[in-house]
Amino acid sequence: MQMKLKLTVAAAIAALGGLASAQDVQVVKIGHVAPMSGAQAHYGKDNENGVRMAIEDLNAQSIVIGGKKIKFEIAAEDDAADPKQGTAVAQKLCDSKVAGVVGHLNSGTTIPASKVYHDCGIPHVTGAATNPDLTKPKYNTTYRIIANDNALGAGLALHAADKLKLKTVAIVDDRTAYGQGVAEVFKKTAESKGMKVVDQQYTTDKATDFMAILTAIKGKKADAIFYGGMDAQAGPMLRQIEQLGMSNVKFFGGDGICTQKIIELSGGAKTLDNVVCAEGGASLAKMPGGLAWKKRYDAKYPNQFQIYSPFTYDATFVLVDAMKRANSVDPKVYIKELPKTNFKGVTANIAFEPNGEIKNPAMTLYTYKDGKKIALD
């Protein structure tokens, strides 16, 4: 009887121990925002995949913060690449008290959302939005782990002038914060190198017919076209450039057009081979963990890779790294650790300037050959 009683007590203690350990698990939500609907949904899905993959890898580490085992979960939102929707979902994430946010994708949504996050004290890290204006307010909540448009636009213009020896260029942008910003940097740098801007045209991030714009540019006999915008417009534009017999015109753009999807969107146009585009960050082959990471990504999300998922993966880890160093998941506490970040990520060794920009940003130029995207350097 005494033995049976001891066993019963032992079982009860074990059960209580199990209950206690279950109660010690704390769920920590990390927000992610990108366009998950509309013409840019392929970017958004890729970005979200990066965050989901990071959260899965983090949960496999059985991380303990503040004496509690942490289970990370994603709080995913769709901003449809629309600034108003971007601020609305940013406020939703603030109200639901997520611990941090990875996003947004577009500069036009990230810039207004950054004020919302600042006002509610939640850190956000973007691995995609590149307009330099994002970090001008110097919010202690805003961080970027990718080169900005000052690097991308200038790098493309220098390549056009110095490497390709082009003399004239026409510039088109979609009037978004991103498209307009990267086009302005390209124009300024190109002109400083002696290139002549023979035409400047404007469109929108919803347009698909560019024949009038391109016909005007054809009349100016430009050596090249720079397009500030995304691949949903660049793809049809490349088809229409070919239809107008402008097959020798070089086509430049920033990371917004530098995708796998543009191969499909250009519909087999030979002008795809004339594209030179720029991405912030090293090529996958030159990233510290790029190729091994990409192999895991492709196994998990076949045929979904675009550009930014390695950066959103690292952005998630950067937030959690700060939480671990602060021994707290409270944004008010761990935010003090973000400026001290020195994290060896998949994309780079990540550290920040005082304004939240990544230190020593890398940039890579790409072109397309035989339907494949290849790095130029």
Image: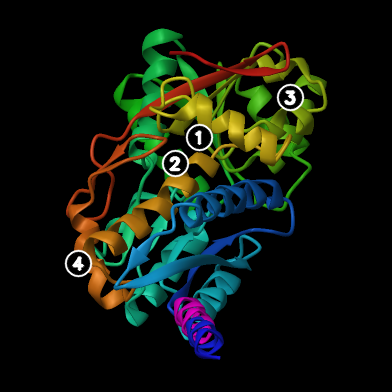
**Kind of residue at badge 2:** Val
- Mark pair 1, 4: CA separation: 33 Å
Please give the name of the residue rendered at 29% of the width and 61% of the height, measured from the top-left corner.
Answer: 324
| Quadrant of image for the N terminus | bottom right
Q: Earlier in the sequence, mark 2 or mark 3?
A: 2
Q: Is residue 258 visible in this depiction of the protein?
A: no
- Mark pair 1, 2: CA separation: 7 Å
Report the disc number at residue 182.
Answer: 2
> Label 3: which residue?
241
> Label 1: which residue?
254
Q: Are marks 1 and 2 in contact (CB under 8 Å)?
A: yes
Q: Earlier in the sequence, mark 1 or mark 4?
A: 1
Q: Quadrant of residue 123?
A: bottom left
Q: Position of residue 89 (x, y in %)?
A: 56, 75
Tell me, yes or no, whether the highlighted magenta stretch contains residue 18: yes
Closer to the camera in the image, 180 or 299: 299
**Kind of residue at badge 3:** Ile
Please give the name of the residue rendered at 66% of the width and 51% of the height, measured from the top-left corner.
Answer: 45
> Label 4: which residue?
336
**Kind of residue at badge 4:** Lys
- Mark pair 2, 3: CA separation: 21 Å
Q: Position of residue 216 (x, y in %)?
A: 67, 31
Extreme-front residue of the structure: 1
**Kind of residue at badge 1:** Gly
Q: Which residues are magenta?
A: 11-23
- Mark pair 1, 3: CA separation: 18 Å
**220 up-or-down from 95: above or below:** above
Numbered disc 4: secondary structure? helix
* Helix, strand or loop: magenta stretch: helix
Closer to the camera in the image, 244 or 238: 238
